[in-house]
Amino acid sequence: TQLLEQSPQFLSIQEGENLTVYCNSSSVFSSLQWYRQEPGEGPVLLVTVVTGGEVKKLKRLTFQFGDARKDSSLHITAAQPGDTGLYLCAVPSSGSARQLTFGSGTQLTVLP
Amino acid sequence: DAGVIQSPRHEVTEMGQEVTLRCKPISGHNSLFWYRQTMMRGLELLIYFNNNVPIDDSGMPEDRFSAKMPNASFSTLKIQPSEPRDSAVYFCASTRGRPGLKHYEQYFGPGTRLTVT
């Protein structure tokens, strides 16, 4: 059983559409991070959420941490081809805050 | 500033050969991570160093895999002998640990795509 379940696994949409992807767990976390990985590159941090119910916005991306700090969502408004990539959520490992456990990711493709 | 540097970017080798992957973390970062990414298993942590000392190697698949960090600016991941199932993208990441900090951003290199035939 994966610690972090991400859904959907794959998502293909047209430019201009809105979408939401999810990161779920049965465990409670002190913080949660979202990374984006573009083809041929390593993941890059988008945001860190730390407070239950917290909402953070990054241009057209809206991140929410669940009230119970067990889950998170990422909403993209008016998706663009540049949003294409693998979206990964990650949480600190129980042994060390520096060590992260990653979800399996959502592969997003935005078609022009 | 230079990010995390990995070499080679691509490696194709035959089964049974030794493979060495290299990583230079961001200057000033004191934690270094080696990950393996495949379609089937996603991004898996192999080993984690703090101040050049291996802290957690529970993700290292088997004795064929070994990692070293002789100094703060260089690490290697070696596979000997390599097998086709080792084919994957291997990432190195680094971060700067500070006492009391509760969450950390990891900075990833571009990865090494390994193909073992």
Image: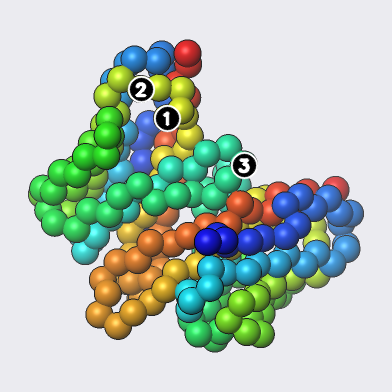
Q: Secondary structure under badge 2?
A: loop
Residue B103 in the image, given as x and y percentages of width and height: 29, 66
A34 over A80 or under it: above or below: below
Q: Mark 1 lies on which chain?
A: A
- Front residue of A21/A61: it is A61
- Front residue of B3/B93: it is B3
Q: Can residue A31 be seen in this view?
A: yes
Is label 2 on the same chain as label 1?
A: yes
Question: In this figure, which residue is indicated by the disc labeled 2?
Answer: A79
B19 over B98 or under it: above or below: above
Cα–Cα gap, marks 1 and 3: 15 Å
Residue B9 in the image, given as x and y percentages of width and height: 72, 52
Instruction: Specify the amino acid type for callout 1.
Output: Asp
Question: In this figure, which residue is indicated by the disc labeled 1?
Answer: A83
Instruction: Specify the amino acid type for callout 3.
Output: Gly
Q: Secondary structure under badge 3?
A: loop
Sequence-first tag of 2 and 3 = 3
Question: In this figure, which residue is indicated by the disc labeled 3?
Answer: A40
Would residue A93 appear left or right of B45 to someone viewing this image?
Answer: left
Total numbered labels: 3
Res. B61 image quadrant:
bottom right
Q: Which chain carries label 2?
A: A
Residue at (43% x, 62% y) in the render:
B106
Res. B6 image quadrant:
bottom right
Residue at (61% x, 52% y) in the render:
B110
